[in-house]
Image (spheres, coloured by chain):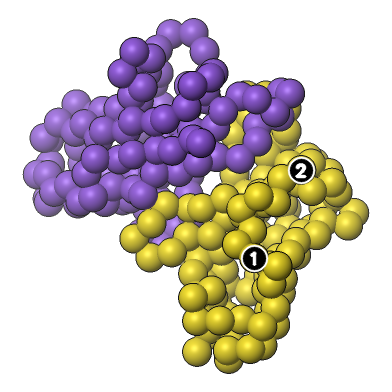
Amino acid sequence: GAGVSQSPRYKVTKRGQDVALRCDPISGHVSLYWYRQALGQGPEFLTYFNYEAQQDKSGLPNDRFSAERPEGSISTLTIQRTEQRDSAMYRCASSLGGGETEAFFGQGTRLTVV
Amino acid sequence: AQSVSQHNHHVILSEAASLELGCNYSYGGTVNLFWYVQYPGQHLQLLLKYFSGDPLVKGIKGFEAEFIKSKFSFNLRKPSVQWSDTAEYFCAVNGYNYGGSQGNLIFGKGTKLSVKP
């Protein structure tokens, strides 16, 4: 597609439920990143992939969070047993990869856990 | 660990005023530096970036930023702001230590700019 696409745009879920957030990067982009942004804060790194390989998951806050990119394109960020503190904007970005490339961001998914 | 500090949380200016938003980073090695902008209701967009070369970089919409290595700073400037510049601005850095790949960006907390018409 023309840009990074994230779905859903808005998600309201009950505490304890699992949620899956989807990111469809720009076609041909090697690298894909997940960020979380709380209100009044900057985006906080969660994890990133080159192709299907997860390169760094040091930003995932705990083992309830996981991400995959099985075919090196679309990625899913899954949060199990959601808690209210998981409420935030979840942003995905992609880039061509390699040095000196720009990361393009999607519109984000606003997750609210009630 | 890398970190980014943006000094101003909210800046209010009148149209035609000059703008300077401060950004300092903490990282001992080679860095790539970025300013992103988020207009109301839109996604993050790149304003400008610095990788190497001339420390004064020019971006879109008349913005520029100067990398001062000795001060670990990358301040954003615009000589004359417009109402349409109202947005949130984020400084970001990544340490160039991933064998050529971009790696992850570390963002500051952001500065909200409100421009009064």
| Amino acid bearing label 2 | Gln
Q: Which residue is at the far right? A: A71
On screen, residue A111 above or below A104: below
The chain holding disc 2 is A
For label 1, the crowd category at 10 Å Cα-Cα, with few meaning under 14, some 14 to 19 and many 20 or more, is few
What shade does chain B have?
purple
The chain holding disc 1 is A
Chain given the colour yellow: A
Q: Residue B100, image x and y in percent?
A: 71, 23
Residue highlighted by disc 1: A62
Task: Please name the residue shown 73% across and 58% down the image.
Answer: A24
Q: Residue A72, image x and y in percent?
A: 85, 49
B9 relative position to B53: left or right = left
Residue highlighted by disc 2: A55
Which of marks 2 and 1 precedes in the sequence? 2
Task: Please name the residue shown 54% across and 18% down the image.
Answer: B30
| Amino acid bearing label 1 | Asn
**Which of the pair A24/A20 is nearer the observer?**
A20
